Amino acid sequence: MLPSSKASSSRCRSLDSGPQPRIGFGLPPAWICAALLASGCAAKQLPYDEAIKDRRRPDAVVIDPVTGTPRPDYRAEAADGMVVLRTPLGVDQAMATVAELFRKATLEDVDGIESVFSPRAQQNLPPSAGAQPSQAGTFWQQRLRKLRGRYALLAGETLYREGEVEIFRAEDAAFAPRPPAIGAESLDPNDFVMRVPILIPRVGPDRLFGDEVTIWLKRDGSRFRIHQVIEDFQLN
């Protein structure tokens, strides 16, 4: 005898209503995932020194050594290689320093006249006098103080003519007579020596300048300063 359909329906309901076993793979708990990830990362981590060794190094780069700048000079030859040349100063700038000396003298600028001389500038008598040189800046200050009022009488007067000034440079030594007490071998290529004939060496009985003044000029930056004066003049 077959069971009735009602009994079969009741049995099916009792099976559906009970707890059912989980079939297949669901998501694992979160703590299991974290543990698995941590263990995987720990397995792949390298010690610090090995990690540094494994890091890719850049390709080598050749760097030229730094070379110093050559010392500036006034002239050079083709065989000298790389050189740094000074911009030359012309004779007009040397003449400007000479003019400044006589201008300050006739203004009796006791304090300012020292600026036209280099710190070690010397005032010399001609070699025949056999006298010891003096510090040029101090010597000119003393002569302006001692003859105060005399030099001012020459203010505005023409003391020399530029066309009569003899100009000497080291490169002229082969064909021009060298100035007294100045050897051509001691001149730098950019030095000037000027022999200045004085038109008014006296005012009355007072001698204010020698008959000629020889002035040796050296470059000092962008200008010339007087390095030596040779003059037949003495303070009595």
Image (cartoon, rainbow, N blue to C red):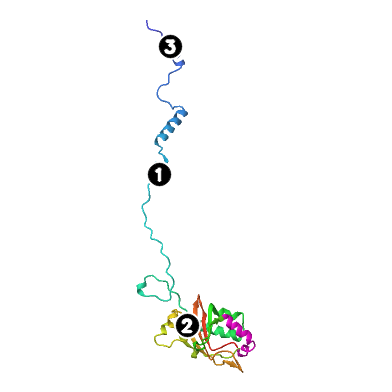
Residue 106, compared with residue 31, is above or below; it is below
In this view, the mark in front (2 or 3): 2
Pointer 1 or 2: first along the chain: 1
- Which residue in the protein does label 3 denote? 11
Say left or right for 78 vs 38: left
For the question of whether residue 107 can be seen, the reply is no
Q: Quadrant of residue 71?
A: bottom left
Circles 1 and 3: CB atoms closer than 8 Å: no
Please give the name of the residue rendered at 35% of the width and 73% of the height, measured from the top-left corner.
Answer: 79
> Looking at this rendering, what residue extends furthest in the left direction?
79
User: Mark 1 or 3 closer to N-term?
Assistant: 3
Q: Position of residue 187 (x, y in %)?
A: 45, 80
- Furthest residue in direction front, as rendered: 130
Q: Secondary structure at mark 2?
A: strand
Residue 80 inside the magenta-drawn segment: no
From the viewer's side, name the closer residue of 164 and 134. Answer: 134
The disc placed on residue 192 is 2
Q: Which residue is mark 1?
A: 52
Find the distance from the CA under tag 1 to the CA under tag 3: 71 Å
Q: Residue at x 42, y 41 (%)?
A: 48
Q: Which mark is residue 85?
A: none
Which one is nearer the viewer's eye here, 234 or 223?
234
